[in-house]
Image: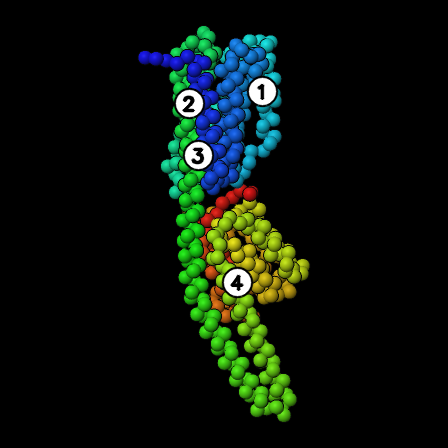
Amino acid sequence: MWIPDIKTLFLLLFLVNVFLTLLLFSFWKTQKTYDGFKTWMLSLLVASCGYFLFMLSGFVPVLLSSTVANLLIALSVMMRLDSTGKYFRSRALPGVIYCILIPFAFLLFYFVFRVDSVVIRGVIIGLLIVPCFVATSLIALRFREPETRSLRYGFAAALLITALLWTAIVVAAIITPGDHSLSGPDPQNSIFFIVTILMDIVATVFFLLLNMARSQTELRKSEEALSRANKKLTILSSITRHDIKNQLIALSGYLELSKEKQDNLPVISEYLEKEMSIVTTIGSQIDFSKAYEDMGKTAPVWQNVNASVRRAVAVLPMRAVRVEVDRSDLALYADPLFEKVFYNLIDNALKYGGDTMTKIHISCHETKTGLVLICEDDGAGITREDKEHLFMQGFGKNTGLGLFLSREILSITGITIAETSEPGNGARFEMNVPKGAYRFGHP
């Protein structure tokens, strides 16, 4: 059986990583990709450089073919950890973590030029690489996304196999005598590199498939959301026309009465007030129909809850009322009009919470079925009678459209909202967000 020599294996590793880099680059240029994709692509390029230097061993200085090459491989593995964190948690690896390469570089340099010890160099590289592989696989395993479970498990398995292989090589070098250099003649080196090549391919292919699966999932959700929105628009169009027609009939009646009472100024003044109130209502209904028309025009997107709250607060008369948001890294998958939900909730609290209200608190907690997002205040609260009609179109002291619109905006991506407070204990709105429609992590 033909067993390739080490130089050939390094060449294969180099070519495989170059090919995978080009594959990901082509995908990145033509398809939708997500956080971390470019980092993974660059990690393959960095690994290619490391394997190229290994391949040139004997033709370039040892500093390059050993120390720098090993550091490049370690850097590429750290970049894959960084990439996975970005993809699954929208959280980059802190830059300071990369600084750990500096002391390791000095250690490698020392054990190459001062004390030539292949075993210690292997332990040093293992201490860098193995924890990164394990941490990367754990991020994928712990991420809760049922649609990609099999892909995540395959991705994590490839990384864990590589970590196990590195651990076995290092342990074998420590407990058994002999030449343990990876460029040495030991047959296990060939097995190690062949498996490494396969795992590089498998992990990268799974990472690519995860991107494709997420894109397909978001496309399906967008299509479902747009379909629901179009149905709602059709229904509301007829409702709004009916409501405006009723208001116009009332306005016409008051105008007729005004003509009959031209000499009675007090009555005329009363009729004029009613007529202006009807005109204001018609204007509000037209404005509402415009906002409702905008709903569902574009596909849902990920939106940071804290940022949406802050934008709403910036344009509302907050008085001395403070708004607290427990988490700044929560994002919901919702219609682009999602910001209006918090605008309406906070606006209602300011209007009806009373002078004793001092704060509005927004918090969340996860459940078995998803996430509960809570917006509550310490104001006057809501009566039991009003609770039953809060989200009905036209209910309320003003236009009665704000909470109705909020419910409709949320429902586009399957989010429900309910008022759950006890009368007299402030208002408390709970939004139930299904799995897949929320995530944690800064953009």
- Mark 4 vs mark 2, CA separation in Å: 55 Å
Label 4–label 2 contact, CB within 8 A:
no
181 over 145 or under it: above or below = above
Q: Which residue is mark 2?
A: 197
The amino acid sitting under disc 1 is Phe
Q: Which mark is residue 104?
A: 1
- Residue 406 in view, yes or no: no
Spot occupied by residue 251 in the image (x, y as percentages of width and height): 54, 81
Label 1–label 3 contact, CB within 8 A:
no
The amino acid sitting under disc 2 is Ile
265 over 392 or under it: above or below = below
- Mark 1 vs mark 3, CA separation in Å: 28 Å
Identified at 41% across, 26% down, the residue is: 199
Counting residues from the N terminus, which is met first, the one under dot 1 or under dot 2?
A: 1
Q: Which residue is mark 3?
A: 207
Local SS, label 2: helix
Q: Which residue is mark 4?
A: 291
Q: Residue furthest right?
A: 320
The amino acid sitting under disc 3 is Phe
Local SS, label 4: helix
Q: In which quadrant will I find the C terminus? A: top right
Identified at 48% across, 77% down, the residue is: 246
Counting residues from the N terminus, which is met first, the one under dot 1 or under dot 3?
A: 1
Local SS, label 3: helix
Q: Residues within 10 Å of mark 1 (few under 14, many from 20)?
A: some
Q: Residues within 10 Å of mark 4 (few under 14, many from 20)?
A: few
- Mark 1 vs mark 2, CA separation in Å: 25 Å
